[in-house]
Amino acid sequence: MRIRKRLEGLAREALWDCAAAFMIAVGLSVFAAGADFAPGGVNGLSLIIRHLFGLPMGAVSLVLNGPVILVTYKLLGRDFLLKSLKSMVICAVFMDYVIPFVPPYHGNQLLAALFAGAFNGAGLALIYLQNSSTGGSDFLILSVKKLKPHLSIGQITQIIDGSVIVLGGFVFRNIEAVLYGIVCTAVTTAVIDRIMNGACSGKTVMIITESGRRIAAEIDRAMGRGATIMRATGGYSGTQKDAVLCVCSHRQIPQVRRVVQGLDGNAFVIVGEFTQVYGEGFQKLEEN
């Protein structure tokens, strides 16, 4: 049974890796390479080397990852490295053997930068959500993230990629290559943060009511969501009531409203957004 579950997990990871690799390869080979700019990171360096010497991007990316792996191995650990090697190889295969059959886009360069950033960001986010990476600057990015957890992955990406983008401007001999590289990286940053935060986001509901226990019990029965009951005192009236705090998904908000309306039509309900939550039923703290 354990072996079967392990194999199913590996197959699921491989499918996500293939989807992510396809998007990353499309962003680089179809849009960025066709518009003559480097989007940053090791993949950007691979694109520059392909432009200068005609070498395949996937193979070059694997070679460039060697020194970076040696530098970051102890900090990121063996398990993460092995998962990342799998993702790296799949990405290299897609870049060198799958996407070359797709014709590059030679149209508007701004559109190319926008779509390159969107595809690249979506692919990287899918890989990061599996606690993996595509190697190269990803190792550096996630190493900095461990050392500086207050920085978002998107922000770190933007900082590290800047040098490669500037180098691309010199290689392509065009200041617009730098500008489009910046646009591409900015879009990548936004997409990564949006997907990674969105995957953990939801709604926080605060209900001020005289029927706290009944409402909490009905929320648990109807949606399987726990709730915390606190005592609250009105600042003006001094009246004692229950404050019921519940964290739920976006689609569960109508159910919460129906529960509250059915049990206490005079309740005061506050609905807010959260981007990350850790604990039972959500992400584990060590997954941050």
Image (cartoon, rainbow, N blue to C red):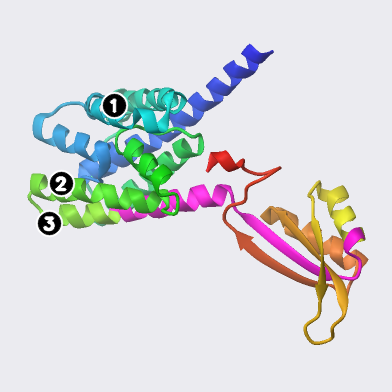
Q: Position of residue 259 (x, y in %)?
A: 86, 60
Q: Which residue is mark 1?
A: 70
Q: Which residue is mark 2?
A: 168
Please name the residue shown 84% across and 62% down the image: 258
Which marked residue is nearer to the observer: mark 3 or mark 1? Answer: 1
Q: Secondary structure at mark 1?
A: helix
Q: Position of residue 81 (x, y in %)?
A: 40, 26
Please name the residue shown 30% across and 39% down the image: 137
Q: Secondary structure at mark 2?
A: helix
Number of residues whose C-alpha sits closer than 10 Å to that of mark 1, classed few (under 14), some (14–19) or many (20 or more): few
Q: Is residue 114 magenta?
A: no
Q: CA distance from mark 3 to mark 2?
A: 9 Å
Please name the residue shown 45% across and 42% down the image: 125
Q: Which residue is mark 3?
A: 175
Do we see residue 192 in this rendering? yes
Q: CA distance from mark 3 to mark 1?
A: 34 Å
- Which span is picked out in magenta? 184-213
